Amino acid sequence: MSAISGIVKQGGENLVRNVWGMWDGMCLRDYTRIVIIVGGYLLLLPYLLKFAAKIQAKQYAKVVDTDASTSSDKLSHNQLWGPGTVDLTHSDSEDIQNDRIASGADWGTKARKRQKRATKIIIEEKEEKMLEAEGDIDDKEIMDLLVDYEEGKNGW
């Protein structure tokens, strides 16, 4: 700890000595030079800021013009969605809630519809397979009941 405090103390002494010693060796010409530099900076600062603001405004106008020209060619996502509310119609009896209206942020609706379509397709495929299997059985039963026709037999 004493080493750290010694370093801080030495730094403080050097700072004081350099600040006060700087003014000792200066003549009138050095003082005049400092006054001119600081005064010129203070006088020119507002003009420099106005000039920089004009340049920045021109650059911003260019960016806005290019954005406007590209956005007029294509519709933005928000324009495609449209303003206002959206009426959602669901075929599920549990989802219908007396003409539900959403503000466009109805989370999970697409996933729910996609899952419903997938399960509906799977159920239809299972039903088709069952009908085909039942149809094969029905065809076999009918074939057992049918008699092959041969001339001269069984009265044919």
Image (cartoon, helix red, strand yellow):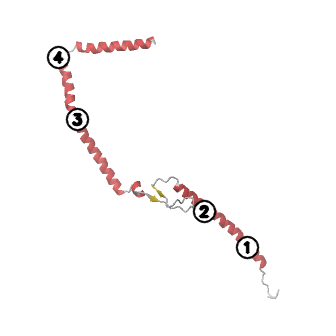
Write down the quadrant of residue 94 in the picture. bottom right
Image location (x, y in percent) of residue 24: 23, 12
Categorize mark 3 by other alpha carbons within 10 Å: few (<14), some (14-19), many (20+): few
Categorize mark 4 by other alpha carbons within 10 Å: few (<14), some (14-19), many (20+): few
Secondary structure, mark 2, is helix
Write down the quadrant of residue 77 in the picture. bottom left
Amino acid type at circle 3 is Leu
Q: Is the Cβ of the residue at disc 1 closer than 8 Å to that at disc 4?
A: no
Secondary structure, mark 1, is helix
Which circle's residue, 2 or 1, is located before the other in the chain? Answer: 2
Q: Nearer the viewer, residue 102 or 20?
A: 102
* Residue found at the very far front of the displayed protein: 98
Rendered image: mark on residue 28: 4
Secondary structure, mark 3, is helix
Rendered image: mark on residue 121: 2
Q: Is residue 153 visible?
A: no
Is residue 2 placed above or below 105 in the rendered structure?
Answer: above
Q: Is residue 51 visible?
A: yes
Q: Is the Cβ of the residue at disc 2 closer than 8 Å to that at disc 1?
A: no
Amino acid type at circle 1 is Asp
